[in-house]
Amino acid sequence: MRPFLKWAGGKYRLVELIKAQLPPGKRLLEPFAGSCALSLNTDYHNYWLNDINTDLINLYQALQREGTAFIEFCREYFTPETNTAEKYYEIRKQFNRETDILVKSALFIYLNRHGYNGLSRYNASGEFNVPFGKYSKPYFAEKELTYFLAKFENAEFTSLDFETMLSKARNGDVVYCDPPYEPLSETSNFTSYSAGGFGRSEQKRLAEVASRTAARGIPVLISNHSTDFIKEIYQKAQKIEFPVRRFISCNGDNRNTVVEILAIFK
Ligand SMILES: C[S@@+](CC[C@H](N)C(=O)[O-])C[C@H]1O[C@@H](n2cnc3c(N)ncnc32)[C@H](O)[C@@H]1O
């Protein structure tokens, strides 16, 4: 099943490949959950889904708490009248001021489908600043929302830094980490998921935390671009590389192949 959100770096297309490398366990932990593409398509007894983006986690908690009534509420924002640039910027402004979590979460779904490329980008003051996407009929993902709700009825959702989360992992857990990609070149780092970036020191910190977690008997799988730097910091892990076809240019028709890596710390 597809996630109900569009998410930069989403792994829906790679689910089978990643799943094949995941060790068995009782509970799956995703410290960088994003749209939860992998978890949605696995069959663990339980899930702990985490992401530093609090708007995202507030939305998942709202859906879990309010159920189908929340889905119905979200649908109200998907009309021809709300699909204009003027209305979009009005709703974006409302989102940045909104204090009611339920309303803000519904607006987040609206922005995700009406904003450019489904990006979730914030300026230095933490304001959502993605421009209008100009889609002819934005899709309201009712089927996907309903599936998510049932699948994660008992899941735990948190918004912690990955290191804090992993310090609380226990025996029987399995971890899949999908951090923001290490850029392929100095200029290609186009995404910003939340205020604050994910640079080389963060990538290194993650590799160290993965080693420590594995030493406690909890296996950790990490995906990333296969660059020299990444291969060096994943030295202690078992590694698999594979090519992925990907849009790389702004005009959208320039496809290229990049090499990705899956590293298993165990
Ligand atoms: C590549 S995306 C994950 C995509 C996800 N696997 C999917 O299929 O949609 C990386 C995620 O890491 C989150 N993130 C960035 N820094 C983080 C941190 N320090 N701790 C936890 N999550 C973080 C971002 O908000 C973003 O959602």
Image: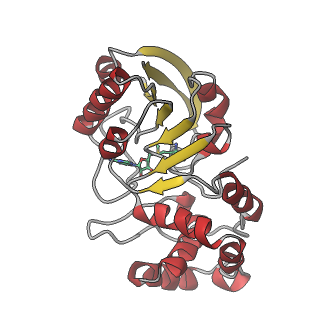
Answer with left or right where residue 67 lies relative to residue 143: left
Q: Nearer the viewer, residue 9 or 212?
A: 212
**Residue appearing at x 33%, y 14% in the figure:** 236
Residue 156 point in image, percent of width and height: 51, 53
- Image coordinates for residue 251, horizontal then vertical, percent: 55, 49
The residue furthest right is 143
Quarter residue 15 falls in: top right
Measuring from the top left, give residue 223's x and y in whole percent: 47, 30
Image spot of residue 97 (x, y percent): 39, 83
Residue sitting at the far left: 201
Query: Which image quadrant is residue 40 in?
Result: top right
Residue ID at (38%, 32%): 184
Q: Is residue 253 visible?
A: no
Mark yes or no: residue 167 visible. yes
Residue beneath the point at 54% across and 38% down? 28
Give the total number of marks visible in the rendering.
Answer: 0
Q: Quadrant of residue 140?
A: bottom right
Query: 44 or 137, which lies in front?
Result: 44
The chosen color scheme is secondary structure
- Is 165 left, or right, of 22 in this rendering? left
Quarter of the C terminus within the rendering: top left
| In this picture, residue 250 sits left or right of residue 65 | left
